[in-house]
Amino acid sequence: MTYKLYYAQGSAAMGVRVLLEEIGAPYELIETTIDMDKPRPEEQLALNPNGWIPVLIWDNQAMYECAAITVFLCDRHSEVNLAPGTHDPARGLFLQTLVYFSSSVQNAFQLSYYPDRFADTPADEPSAQARGVRRLRETWKVIDDQIGQNRWVLGDQFSAADIYLFMLTTWLDQSLGHPSTDEFPNVDRIAHAVMKRPSVQKVYRE
Ligand SMILES: N[C@@H](CCC(=O)N[C@@H](CS)C(=O)NCC(=O)O)C(=O)O
């Protein structure tokens, strides 16, 4: 069985691709776009009417939402140990962090990158954007404090949460006023460690 992944450079689909590389599962990329001025393929919209990626396809099924895909793949390929199992004491922190990334950190990015979705009129968009930048600082600080001196997000054990963290750091853009990871030394340390992994080198080198 070969997974298929709707994919674009610089998008949230890159984290799922790194995960598939770490798992060693066969996959094919279906190139699409995140450009707001370009239409999404009909087949993609049929699977995710929001037009977002990633969308993962396997057998005759499909799903979207990065955090959900991450848990799904880790559980399906538990032999590679990229997530604590259901009864592992670290399971709660793993799920908490993924959902926080997806609902809070990504939401702050959305305010910054897509202010039209959060403002009623074009005149209100700069305000939404500015709040997004401030929200990025707030949410990354929460994650930085959570990590503390831990080697990885969950402590001693590398996990898919570290890959997710790395991917999110690549979206920080100082030209848009975003903070640099220098402001969050614990996040920065993990992001640099993840960057060295062969899976990341392969996916982000292209
Ligand atoms: N909540 C979704 C959001 C994914 C998302 O924001 N994807 C972006 C790329 S990073 C996208 O497809 N943007 C294009 C759009 O929103 O139209 C997830 O976590 O999978």
Image (cartoon, helix red, strand yellow):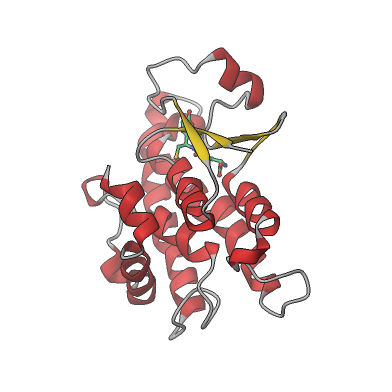
Position of residue 97 measured from the top left corner of the image (x, y, whole percent): 58, 65
Side (left or right) of 35 relative to 173: right
Residue found at x 27% / y 42%: 206
Residue found at x 57% / y 13%: 42
Task: Name above or below for residue 23 compared with residue 187.
Answer: above
Q: Quadrant of residue 84?
A: bottom right
Q: Quadrant of residue 76?
A: bottom right
Q: Nearer the viewer, residue 90 or 60?
A: 60
Position of residue 6 measured from the top left corner of the image (x, y, whole percent): 51, 31
Question: From the image, which quarter does the N terminus lie in?
Answer: top right
Residue found at x 44% / y 56%: 135
Q: Identify the residue at the far right of this view.
A: 87
Q: Quadrant of residue 50?
A: top right
Position of residue 137 measured from the top left corner of the image (x, y, whole percent): 39, 62
Q: Identify the residue at the far bottom of this view.
A: 149
Task: Name above or below for residue 107 compared with residue 146.
Answer: above
State whether residue 119 appears in this view.
Answer: no
Q: Nearer the viewer, residue 157 or 180?
A: 157
Q: How many numbered tags mark residues here?
A: 0
Q: Nearer the viewer, residue 9 or 132?
A: 9
Q: Identify the residue at the far left of this view.
A: 175
State whether residue 95 appears in this view.
Answer: yes
Position of residue 114 measured from the top left corner of the image (x, y, whole percent): 43, 34
Residue found at x 49% / y 34%: 28
Task: Name above or below for residue 182 compared with residue 23.
Answer: below
